[in-house]
Image (cartoon, rainbow, N blue to C red):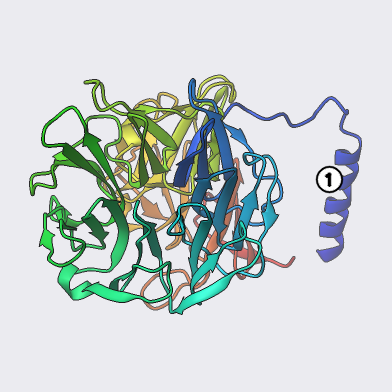
Amino acid sequence: MRTSLRSFIRTVLVFLLFVPASAQWVPTSGPVGGRIEAITTSPHYLFAGASPGGVFRSQRYPIEWFPVGRGIVDNMLLSLLSVDHLVFAGTEDGLFCSDDEGSSWRKLGTWSAVPAICATRDALGRRMIVMAVDHDGIWSSIDDGGNWTRMRSGTYTVLASDSTGKLYAGNTAGIIRSDNLATMWTTIATASQFSGAVRTIALRDSMICVGTSYGGVSISRNNGSTWKNIGLKSMNGHGIVQTSLAIVPDTTSIPVAFTLYAATTAGVFSSLNGDTTWTAGPAGLDPLITQCVLANDGTLYAGTAGGGVFTRVPSYPSGWLPANTGLCAVSIGSLAVLRNTVLAATTDGALFRSADNGLTWASVTEMKSREVTFVASAADTFYANSDGGLYYSADGGVHWKPSSQWNWYGIFQGTASNTSTYVFVASSTGVFRTNGQMQLWERADRGIPQDAFGQLKTMIRSFSGCDSTLFAWTDNGLYRSFNNGTDWKAIDT
């Protein structure tokens, strides 16, 4: 059997060597979007940090993105900062810098993951000071990132500076502040005052706004002397994490009013003048998780977990609009094809559809509220596993129906169909089959080792079939069934 397997592999390799040169892979135009962890602006460009995907750059208008991450070894972006003629990018692999608007990058020293970067200036406003944090502490550079000095030890995940040069850093313990360029630090609030770990800080004049994990938003209007919680702890019974805050002033009003925007795991919310009343929306982002929000020159930018970048002008009544042209930063976890229609499930749980072999793509509207983990096709039907169970579509992925029993059956791994009209589904708990009645499934995995509770002892990693013959590749090897899954036997590979 081992000899025949090696012969088969050699046959496949010979076939591949003689495939005509014209049979080449070409990129599609999408899906567009991705998990955007950070957004920053320079005088001429917008920058978006995708994780994965690297750094993308676009002119201000119209927004059209191009990858500019050459030189960044690790493409899991965590933070971005544009200051003067430099752009800094914090990644899981360290800190990088570009002096040509992102066209090329160089790594700065030896860093661990860098979740936050900010910049300030000395008392005379002449010398730029760049600050960054990693698991070893808070670091400072006065020579454009060439050399770094640790100003405080400890693990910090949030960093911010105000117009007067004050620096703020946050973590699970609370917030500290430095009034002298990071030389000395003072605790101005503990996590217990916020009822949650500090996740984001926004500053304006003497006002400090803090977003937390499940503790809502707190605001201080006197440089941290007193604090008030202004809500946004939960939505529909589910806790909310604030991932980013932005303060947008209304300079036409007297006294000057402001709107506080909060990017959260439940979308973007706004509060007028830091009041306890929060307004969701407007439409366009729900139910996307937002990772960051940035206000610049009268425009709001939001980075989402899977949906890419959205923009909004607050003075216009329209909602959030996607701005993802060229932003191909999605990580594809699963593909399924039926004739000219392609479905792509991303690792962030989004589902995209193309009806023209990948030339154009659109999000699958009916599945936006679900986190899709796997897609497959069999017998002219698409299948999608999600956090709400198994769904199927008989019209090319446009409309979807749930298979009511499937949420009991574990993680979906694949499908197969055959001439006897059975449809098979392999999951983390076993193989199941139906004769087309999607609400009626039966076990079809006798012979694949199971425990006393009927659960498979080995995980099915890949699954396929033809006619009445099925194959299941597991952690313990390959299994085959000749009778529609009624009986299985291991194949010695």
Locate the C terminus and report the quarter of the image it occupies. bottom right
Image mark count: 1
- Amino acid beneath label 1: Val
Answer with left or right where residue 463 lies relative to residue 41: right
Residue that extends furthest to the front in the rendered view of this protein: 124
The location of residue 400, given as percent across then percent down, is 33, 32
Relative to residue 2, is residue 380 depicted above or below? Answer: above
* Quarter of the rendering containing residue 357: top right
The location of residue 479, given as percent across then percent down, is 62, 61
Answer with left or right where residue 60 lies relative to residue 365: right
The location of residue 201, given as percent across then percent down, is 30, 57
Residue linked to disc 1: 12
* Quarter of the rendering containing residue 143: bottom right
- Residue at coordinates 52% horizontally, 45% vertically from top-left? 82
* Label 1 residue SS: helix
The one nearer the camera, 477 or 233, is: 233
Locate the N terminus and report the quarter of the image it occupies. bottom right
The one nearer the camera, 393 or 66, is: 66
Relative to residue 429, is residue 278 depicted above or below? Answer: above
